[in-house]
Image (cartoon, rainbow, N blue to C red):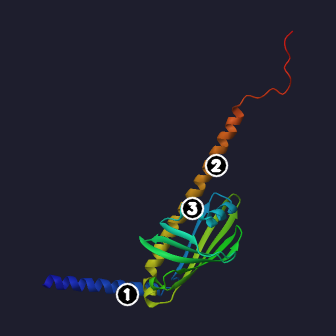
Amino acid sequence: MEFLTRLLKFAVGLLLSAAVVAWFAARRGDRGYIEEEVTIDRPAPSVFRWLTSEDLLRRWISGLVKLERTDTAQSNATFRIDELIASRRVALDLRIMRVVLNQEIEIAVSPVDKSAGNYASDVKFKLLPSGEYTRLVFTAQTDFTSLSDRIFEPLFTFATKRKLREDLSRLKLSMEADTATQSTVHARGTAREAAKPARPTGATTSAR
């Protein structure tokens, strides 16, 4: 009985400590803010295409369950995306707020089911070209309105940031592998053309 009492006290103390740490973490100045970047060996138009093509998005977003457009508007298009974050399925509404071709994309993000969380995110992708390389900068500022969401915000932000870092790495690897494949095919084709015997340009003269 004494052992069970001590175990219960330990468990309660651990929960209280975790709650206090989460509460203080939720009050930090950069709460809800994420910034990640990656440099890709591809020009900005190619990177932009991989950010805006539904087929290409499916190649580098990990844990993607669903991606579909939910309207037919020409501007401020909306999408629904379901993905796994820390093994938990999260359904989000995405509204395209601003697009600068090959330079920037701004997206407003909110949960599909408000009972699963009450927050709103302002997400931006910025493309900074440098020759054939592009530095892709991702930023997101999420505002949590309910007290429970604010308390658990550090865990949500950490899990989202880790997944985003992995996805940007997948984007870089996928794009550069695709570039290498295209370069290899081009190089092989050039080598084959160079290996072909040259055709005579003039008429042949028969021996007398």
Location of mark 3 (residue)? 171
Question: At x 52% / y 67%, what residue is drawn?
Answer: 165
Q: CA distance from mark 1 to mark 3?
A: 37 Å
Give the side of residue 6 with respect to residue 111, left or right: left
Secondary structure found at label 2:
helix
Instruction: Identify the image quadrant of the C terminus.
Output: top right
Residue 99 rendering spot, x and y as whole percentages: 69, 73
First in sequence, mark 2 or 3: give its number: 3
First in sequence, mark 1 or 3: give its number: 1
Residue 86 rendering spot, x and y as whole percentages: 42, 71
Say if 33 sits above or below 37 in the image: below
Question: At x 19% / y 84%, what residue is drawn?
Answer: 6
Q: Tell me, for residue 20, which label it has, or none.
A: 1
Between 80 and 162, the residue placed more toward the observer is: 80
Residue 107 rendering spot, x and y as whole percentages: 61, 77
Q: Nearer the viewer, mark 1 or mark 3?
A: 3
